[in-house]
Amino acid sequence: MHIPVLAKEAIELLNLKSGDNAIDCTLGGGGHSRMILENTKPKGKILGIDIDPTKLDDLQKEFDKNFPNKAKFVHGNFRDLEKIAHDFGFLKAKAILIDLGFSSFQIEDPNRGLSFQDEEAPLDMRLDQSKGETAADLLNSSKEEEISKKIWEYGQERFARAIAKQIIKRRKNNPYIKTKDLILTVLPFYKKFEYSRRHPATRVFQAMRIWVNDELGSLESVIPQAIEILEPEGRLAIISFHSLEDRIVKWRFRDFAKRGKAKIITKKPIVPSEEEISSNPRARSAKLRVIEKI
Ligand SMILES: C[S@@+](CC[C@H](N)C(=O)[O-])C[C@H]1O[C@@H](n2cnc3c(N)ncnc32)[C@H](O)[C@@H]1O
């Protein structure tokens, strides 16, 4: 079960009123969407988008029962937000939420290879498994410089160059197939005593997830589209989980504020309380920023 992160704070700062229409760009398990509809009932509607179609049908049924005719859930990438919103008649919205990253059920899914916990999982990592290259495809076909650059830029992995070199060497006879193939490539670069702090493959896995799903590109492109769709005084809230994402949100929000198109509501990012972190460790690195359209 996925526990929504910074839910109370996000809902409060979205400043929802009865009858407001909202878009949840990252529907996941529907936790935030449920709270949004609770705060906009009886007339408020929600459009929910997720790149991963696996939960959409069940969620649609659940919401149709609990909030009849108030929720429409669609499969898509939020980088196409304007088109999706247009196609489903959400030309304007009072609130837009983007809760980045993955749901617990995706991380735990053994067919996805998002986590290094399951070493036999296919090295896939795509959130939308219907298209695009898997992490294994990228490692088996990209040039050494590109692999090194991505692992450094997206993972800030200090052994990026050496790991990329090792990947090229290994793949000649042993193409990448399972998560353990990548884990075994990374482990020798770390000393045993370093394992206790965090798994040595954490940074490389983060880099591959960002690369495979073009996470930063999607985030860059959704922000201006969201601001365009918002009504005046409508709010956009973004919850990010690592510094690369947070930096993009911070700077894009500042650009819009400087150009007089929006007002920043959170001068500093909102972070989870100690209490939330202890009950949901996934919240640890979360940061919430909110902007209001002028
Ligand atoms: C952290 S979860 C959201 C959890 C949700 N707020 C809840 O309360 O259950 C992030 C979700 O965003 C989806 N996602 C990630 N990148 C996406 C993208 N570019 N477009 C649409 N959905 C995306 C993931 O598939 C995942 O389901």
Image (cartoon, rainbow, N blue to C red):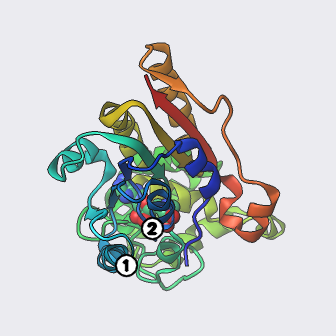
Observer able to see residue 153: no
Q: Is residue 167 depicted above or below 129 in this figure?
A: above
Disc 1 from disc 2: Cα separation:
10 Å
Q: Which residue is mark 2?
A: 30
The amino acid type, in three-letter code, at marker 2 is Gly
Determine whether label 1 and label 2 are within 8 Å by CB: yes
**Tag 2 secondary structure:** loop
Horizontal side, residue 3 vs residue 259: left or right: right
Between label 1 and label 2, give the one nearer the viewer: 1
Disc assigned to residue 76: none
- Determine crowd level at label 1: few under 14, some 14-19, many 20+ residues with C-alpha closer than 10 A: some
Find out if the beta carbon at label 2 lies less than 8 Å from the nearest ligand 1 atom: yes
Question: Residue 210's spot in the image, x, y percent?
Answer: 46, 53
**How many numbered markers are drawn?**
2
Sequence-wise first label, 1 or 2: 2
Q: Please tell me which residue is depicted at 24% across the width and 70% down the height of the picture.
A: 130
